[in-house]
Image: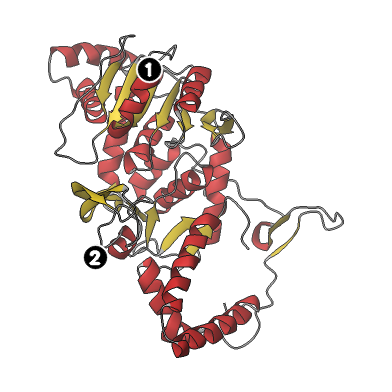
Amino acid sequence: MTRGKTNERIRAARVEPSEYESAYRAIEVLQNLQTRPNESIKTLADIPDYTFAHHPEKETFGVRQILDIQDEQQTNGKIFKKFILGEYKFQTFRQIYKRIENIGRGLLSLNLTLGDKILIYSETRYEWLLTAFSAFRHGLTLVTLYSTLGEDAIKYGINQSKVKIVITSYELIPKLKNISDETEEVRYIIYFPPILKTESIKLPETKNNIQFISLDQLELNGSNALIGLNLNSIFLLIIITYLDEDILKQRPAETDTAVIMYTSGSTGLPKGVLIRHENIIAGMTGQQSRLLSMVNVDTDIYIAYLPLAHILELCCEICMYYLGIKSGYSSPQTLTDQSTGIKQGAKGDLQILRPHLMITVPAILDRIHKAINEKVNQSNYFRRSLFRIAYNRKVKKLEKGLNTPRLNKLIFNRLNQIALGGRLRIMMCGGASLN
């Protein structure tokens, strides 16, 4: 943005100038569409190798440990679970790369091979993407289901995709238990650790002999298969050594299916959308090309909270991982100070992480807009009037491509601090049109 005069730079143009209905494309890539971030990245299997080679000691995935969960009755009689949270703690690219290797080997030890499918049914958390990279590395196809889907939709997705392995959160196992007897192919359920670390593990019995394996155990199996620590491991080592020749070195092709992404089911049963490796690589390349000139890959932080079962969030998190930008994980229940999972007086994830980048959808922006308006309306007449004048002036300037540094300093930086942590510079939006 410019400060003193209208910014008239042409940002996009028609791909086919003579066709009125032609798509518009960014002027920088009008004649040469970018489909890869660089020539070494052809599939999703290449990304962990690239990041490990370029910044192994940088921090990547971060989470706030849940110290306690308390039930709190609201004035309307509803019971909300309130989370007592610690600070963010991060892992390095080196640590994550090692885990991707071990989890990948653990998956292969369950007799999976190139092109086989596994299903992830979980809320957004770093283990989701960790497991996805482990699957992509060996050419496994990832089937995704929204964690908010009902039992009929979950059963439909599992049976239609004919997966033998379902990966889920520990907290969602009871929901799977209700439908496990009606699934045809499932043999293993791999579960992420409980969000409350002190919670004891209680696994249900199933009629069709489904085996439960924790992600930690799967990772250990992969690690032991590599180094052979005991008799079972030695036996696995023989298998893995054989697989090392025939399977471990196999990688997917660009045109292979990376994800079968089931829709939210808003118009009936969810539909599985086949997405190739080259599609996702092209999507994250588009995001990367827009971001590169605006981000500092050494210091910026991204907050991840939208469903990873949606292509927008999946591409964005992969883009952050490729760029080497820290990602702090959150959820709609803990995102802001006013979120349903945050105790009164405690800080939400935005205030603790203080991110520089986030992705959003219009529905979330509407909530932020409503919250800011409520705060403004609670102030006196003079402050309300001052805000409206400043707001209208800023909108007019933005429409001309102009920045408003004085207004930002006087008013809008404070709103950024209150609502978004104070450091947010870039907000990407998708899923629907902006009003």
What's the residue type where badge 1 is placed? Ser
Mark 2 and mark 1 lie on one chain; the one further toward the N terminus is 1
Q: Nearer the viewer, mark 2 or mark 1?
A: 2
Q: Is residue 161 above or below residue 71?
A: above
Local secondary structure at mark 1? helix
On screen, residue 431 above or below 252: below
Look at the numbered discs 2 and 1 and tell me whether their residues touch, using CB distance below 8 Å: no
Residue at 46% from the left image edge and 19% from the top image edge = 116
Q: Amino acid at mark 2?
A: Gly
The residue at which mark 1 appears reads as 180
Residue 69, image x and y in percent? 20, 46
Q: CA distance from mark 2 to mark 1?
A: 41 Å
> Which residue, given by chain and number where applicable, does mark 2 sit on?
345
Image x and y of residue 158, in percent: 47, 21
Asked if one can make out residue 36 in the rendered structure from this viewpoint, the answer is: no
Q: Which residue occupies the extreme front position in the image?
A: 76
Which residue is farthest bottom?
382
Front one among 41 and 118: 118
